């Protein structure tokens, strides 16, 4: 007796679950049980794959945003310049998480080319310092950066902004600055002709459609500032931006505003989290439907096994033991389905970068055309923080589905059952 160490409830439950001779007595019950197991597996796999892809897209967009955005920004409360910029930089860089900092000028303007006009955000940068805090500037051509000289009024435009205005490198564009000049005939907007030094493609539509980069001294002259109105800060770990901002803010005083990238883009991240939560709920319902198919499976099994149940009761099995047999049967279906779904989901999630191109080649189609979407590949980022709850919920639902049929089996009267056999 190799299995004598196992409780008889487990052995009988396993016998009812496996596909063997017992399944031949009622192939329909075996089929329904297999469908329930398959449904749980596919539901769990779908949840893992979808959440991993959503995490991948979020990470991809976040990385592209952080290539343009500051991890932390120290800003003047008004449009005026920051005071003691060098002192602020020195105090900021004393924090162990800070890698570098650089001053900048930030202002909203209008860019005009002929009759076309578009809102833009001007960033006045110091090319010598900006490369240390901004990935896209660090990746720019040295020849292009060299054109951003004081007094040249050269500008680098975002790729989408240049496309909208019909501008290419070497053209001229008119900058319309806020706060025009007051004259006897009224307020006249301040205009400045800029030479387009080049076009920058950051890979992020929102910033490519509004970015205009000047030398910091040229920006100060255009906006009549006495110095930078902000400082960009780069951290070793961008995920700690909120904590670092909270730590350095008291040291800089109340005259400045310290803002991290998570607060500057709160709306986007909130929308992504809501979408991810709704997808989790919708796909969990698929798992729930598959799990509760176990109810009908176990009810039919209990009906089919009434004679077996009556014999076990007459041999001394308690109602709790009868209930345990069918809980084990349902739990095994849930466990096998969940583990199978976990393995399938992880295999697809970790290899989606090669699976999707293979499907595209087979179908002759492109799911993410490069000329339509900013991200032309299917990213995936499986996280155990998502996978753990998926597995637990699937197991809990499968276990919950066994309770009613198991309780019903425990209530069968052995004398009544044997009378009808």
Image (cartoon, rainbow, N blue to C red):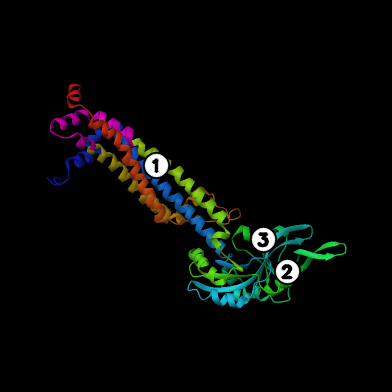
Closer to the camera: disc 1 or disc 2? Answer: 2
**Residue identified by numbered label 1:** 287
Q: Is residue 256 above or below residue 414?
A: below
Residue 300 lies within the magenta run: yes
Q: Quadrant of the C terminus?
A: top left
Label 3 element class: loop
Q: Give the percent coordinates (x, y) of residue 16.
A: 23, 37
Q: Is residue 99 above or below residue 410?
A: below
User: Visible in this render: residue 18?
Assistant: no
Q: Give the percent coordinates (x, y) of residue 109.
A: 72, 62
Q: Is residue 72 left or right of residue 301?
A: right
Q: Earlier in the sequence, mark 2 or mark 3?
A: 3
Q: Quadrant of residue 293?
A: top left
Q: Is residue 90 left or right of residue 172?
A: left
Q: Residue at x 53, y 53 (%)?
A: 270
**Residue identified by numbered label 2:** 223
Q: Is residue 144 left or right of residue 317?
A: right
Q: Quadrant of residue 151?
A: bottom right
Closer to the camera: disc 2 or disc 3? Answer: 2
Q: Earlier in the sequence, mark 1 or mark 2?
A: 2
Q: CA distance from mark 2 to mark 3?
A: 18 Å
Q: Give the percent coordinates (x, y) of residue 235.
A: 51, 70
């Amino acid at each position: 007796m190799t299995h004598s160490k196992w409780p008889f409830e487990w052995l009988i439950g396993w016998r009812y679950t496996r596909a063997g001779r017992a399944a031949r007595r009622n192939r329909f019950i075996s089929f329904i049980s297999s469908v329930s197991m398959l449904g749980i597996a596919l539901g769990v796999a779908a949840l893992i794959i979808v959440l991993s892809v959503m995490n991948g897209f979020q990470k991809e967009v976040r990385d592209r945003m952080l290539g343009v955005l500051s991890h932390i920004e120290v800003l003047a409360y008004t449009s005026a310049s920051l005071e003691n910029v060098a002192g602020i930089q020195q105090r900021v860089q004393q924090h162990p998480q800070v890698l570098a900092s650089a001053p900048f000028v930030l202002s909203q303007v209008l860019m005009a080319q002929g009759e076309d006009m578009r809102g833009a955000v001007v960033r006045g940068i110091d090319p010598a310092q900006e490369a240390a805090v901004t990935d896209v500037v660090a990746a720019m051509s040295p020849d292009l950066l060299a054109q951003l000289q004081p007094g040249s009024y050269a500008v680098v435009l975002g790729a989408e902004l240049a496309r909208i205005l019909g501008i290419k490198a070497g053209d001229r564009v008119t900058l319309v600055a806020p706060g025009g000049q007051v004259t006897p005939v009224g307020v006249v907007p301040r205009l400045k002709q800029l030479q387009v030094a080049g076009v920058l493609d950051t890979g992020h539509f929102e910033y490519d459609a509004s970015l205009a980069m000047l030398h910091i001294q040229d920006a100060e002259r255009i906006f009549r500032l006495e110095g930078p109105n902000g400082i960009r800060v780069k951290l070793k770990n961008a995920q700690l931006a909120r904590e670092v901002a909270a730590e350095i803010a008291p040291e800089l005083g109340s005259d400045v505003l310290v803002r991290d990238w998570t607060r500057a883009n709160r709306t986007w991240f909130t929308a992504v989290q809501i979408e991810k939560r709704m997808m989790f709920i919708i796909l969990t319902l698929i798992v729930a439907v598959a799990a509760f198919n176990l109810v009908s499976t176990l009810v039919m099994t209990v009906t089919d096994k009434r004679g077996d149940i009556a014999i076990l009761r007459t041999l001394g099995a308690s109602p709790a033991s009868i209930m345990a047999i069918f809980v084990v049967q349902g739990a095994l279906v849930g466990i096998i389905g969940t583990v199978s779904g976990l393995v399938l989901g992880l295999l697809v999630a970790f290899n989606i970068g090669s699976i999707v191109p293979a499907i595209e080649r087979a179908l002759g189609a492109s799911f993410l055309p490069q000329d339509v979407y900013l991200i032309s590949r299917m990213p995936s980022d499986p996280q155990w923080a998502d996978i753990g709850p998926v597995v637990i919920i699937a197991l809990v639902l499968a276990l919950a589905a066994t309770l009613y049929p198991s309780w019903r089996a425990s209530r069968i009267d052995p004398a009544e059952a044997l009378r009808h056999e």
